[in-house]
Image (cartoon, grey):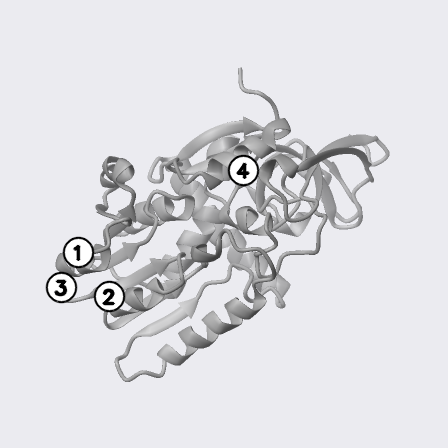
Amino acid sequence: MTRSTTITATEIVLPGPVEPDGLQARVRELPPPGEGQVVLRMEATGVSFAEQQMRLGGYYDQPPFPFVPGYDVVGTVIATGAGVDPALQGRRYAAVTKIGGWASHLHLAAGDLVPVPDGLDPTAAETVLVNGVTAWQMLHRCARVPAGGTVVVLGANGGVGNTLVQLARHAGINVIGTASARHHDAVRQLGAVPVDYRDPDMYPKIRELAPGGVDSVFDHVGGTGLEQSWRLLRKGGTLVNYGSATRKNEQGNALLPMLTLFGRLYAWNYLPNGKRALFYNLWAGKRSLATFRARMREDLTQVLRLVADGALQPQIAARIPLCRAADALTLAESRTVLGKVVIVAEETK
């Protein structure tokens, strides 16, 4: 496709703090790609917890309304701008975007593209993009848990959670995973010991399973339970917090609560017990763009290769077409599904 070819893009817009059925669709002509850019034809994008928070204006560094959500995307390059190798056209790539993925076509910086292995289904690849790189980096770059260690994964049935469980088990790490009772069989199949997160004695039961403490806790819940997660750690263990699901239904800017959370985690590191507490931010280090992109490409390539080799099984909760993005968001927010809700370009036959 030449740079002068007109491309019509369908985009799903989040206009403000609305219910899922308040999402808006718009159609516009997409300008030709600029220098260093490509046009990607979307084949799969996803619904992550970030979009659920953004819907209410509660994601701590989201852009002002209105905007097109969509944290990650898989698709085929159909046009290239100046300074971009034309050989990229016709090839499938993945990218973590933070916003913009809920569109039939979109501009992306060529430097953010990661090749998808040949033969890998785009829906399967999409399922492990932001979830996979988040899980990989938290496990291997943040916590650095050795083989034979034990970790706790809160929300082991969720998109990041089930990927964390699989990556940990692949690395020879024991996993205790929290989930509702209806998902316990699935969590067991992933290789984790399930504990009901609705049980008021959840934390005592985890301590019974690991009386000497655990090497790491991966906590996306935050709130008052964060201190309980901290107490589960053995000496030298690491608490990795990567969200605050307790604020899921709260509207308004999350900056002050996040700053309070950061301060709390920071202070724990000075207690004389050898434990560590940190907040994982996928976008940390982006000021050094070249280093950030290299790390992202390296880690995401590792995750996609594990999927292509069959070592990591994507957990796809549903495939829903872009025109029904409101249904996809509603389903993801219901917390009734195992894995990730994926938005695809068209209705599946």
Upstream in the sequence, badge 1 or badge 2?
Answer: 1
Q: Which mark is residue 232?
A: 2
Front-lying residue, 93 or 29: 29
Say whether disc 3 or disc 1 marks the residue closer to the N-terminus.
Answer: 1
Camera-side residue of 331 and 287: 331
Q: Residue at x 66, y 31 (%)?
A: 90
Question: Which numbered circle lies on residue 205?
Answer: 1
Residue type (three-letter) at the residue carrying disc 2:
Leu
Q: Is residue 75 left or right of residue 317?
A: right
Cα–Cα gap, marks 4 and 2:
33 Å
In this rendering, which labeled residue sits more in front, label 4 or label 2?
A: 4
Secondary structure at badge 3 equals: loop
Q: In the rendered view, does 172 fall on the left or right side of 137?
A: left
SS under mark 4: helix
Residue 113 vertical placement versus 345 (above, below):
below
Q: Nearer the viewer, residue 162 or 326?
A: 326
Mark 2 crowd level (few <14, some 14–19, many ≥20, 10 Å Cα): many
* Nearer to us: label 3 or label 1: 1
x then y, percent, for residue 33: 78, 43
Query: Considering only vertical position in the picture, is 257 above or below 116?
Result: below
Q: Amino acid at mark 1?
A: Lys
Secondary structure beneath dot 2 equals loop
The image position of residue 87, as x and y in percent, is: 68, 37
Q: CA distance from mark 1 to mark 2?
A: 11 Å
Q: Which residue is mark 3?
A: 211
